[in-house]
Amino acid sequence: MKSELLGLARGLRRRLEQAPPPFAAAKTPRDKAARLDEIARAIESCRLCALSATRLKAVPGIGSPDAAVMFVGEGPGFEENRRGEPFVGRAGELLDKILASIGLSRRTVYIANMVKCRPMKDPRTPEARGNDRPPSPEELSACRPHIEAQARVIEPRFIVALGAVAARALLQTEAPISRLRGQWQDIQFGGRTVKLLPTYHPAALLRNPDLKKDVWTDMKALKKALCE
Ligand code: SF4
């Protein structure tokens, strides 16, 4: 009896070792797109934190499965929650212009957020404007496996953290974005070492246009790195 059980356990272990890991590195763009679709389905049915109870649509991400750069924000807002796409509305339009300024677009990079469902100040009034809030440390931690899984598939050369929340979460620091921006740093992300460039969030530029020159400096640095 004991030897039968040992045999069953050995067989099970062998089958698990031979099975592909759920979001293993995919090699061709078509494989990568299929893997990203799997991750998107997992995100859409995710219940790992309380934000799942109030979302209209989860917002997995958008762009090229083979992107050299991932742009990462903090979380969906009012419009993203309705459309299921990151960076739409005025901040999204500005991000499109920033990308175009260095010859990139929504189709050539990958755009995602640290959390995939909308954090609200008051979840009882989802239709109210001005009801967005930054994700909590617990929400960031619960959602992190999703963006790590996306990065594991895409294997980007560079990450651009858009804003303080994403930059601090990825760098595990409390430093202000004004000190972090423009400073390349190596991080462990998606199972690899990736170069991270923090910059300001487009919404911050809408509030304070003086920050645009810093973002332009950062985008020129990104373009130079992409050409090397
Ligand atoms: S925010 Fe992330 S962890 Fe929370 S329910 Fe949505 S997908 Fe899941």
Image: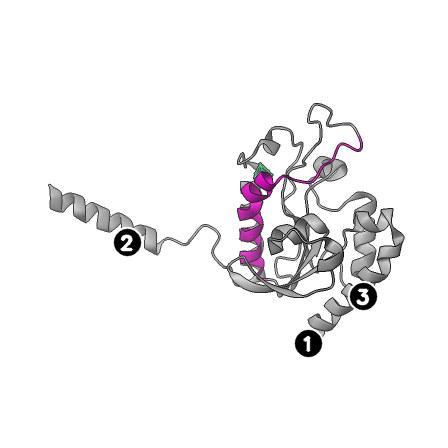
Residue behind mark 3: 217
- What is the x, y in percent for residue 61? 65, 48
Q: Residue furthest top?
A: 124
Amino acid residing under circle 2: Arg
Across the whole image, how many numbered discs are drawn on residues? 3
Residue behind mark 1: 228
Amino acid residing under circle 1: Glu
Which one is in front in this view, the residue at disc 1 or the one at disc 3?
3
Residue at (62%, 50%) from the top-left corner? 169
Q: Is residue 78 above or below residue 38?
A: above
Callout 2: helix, strand or loop?
helix
Residue at (65%, 40%) from the top-left corner? 135
Q: Is residue 59 above or below residue 25?
A: above
Residue behind mark 2: 14
Residue at (22%, 51%) from the top-left corner? 10
Amino acid residing under circle 3: Thr
Going from N to C along the chain, the mark reached first, 1 or 3, is: 3
Which one is in front in this view, the residue at disc 3 or the one at disc 2?
3
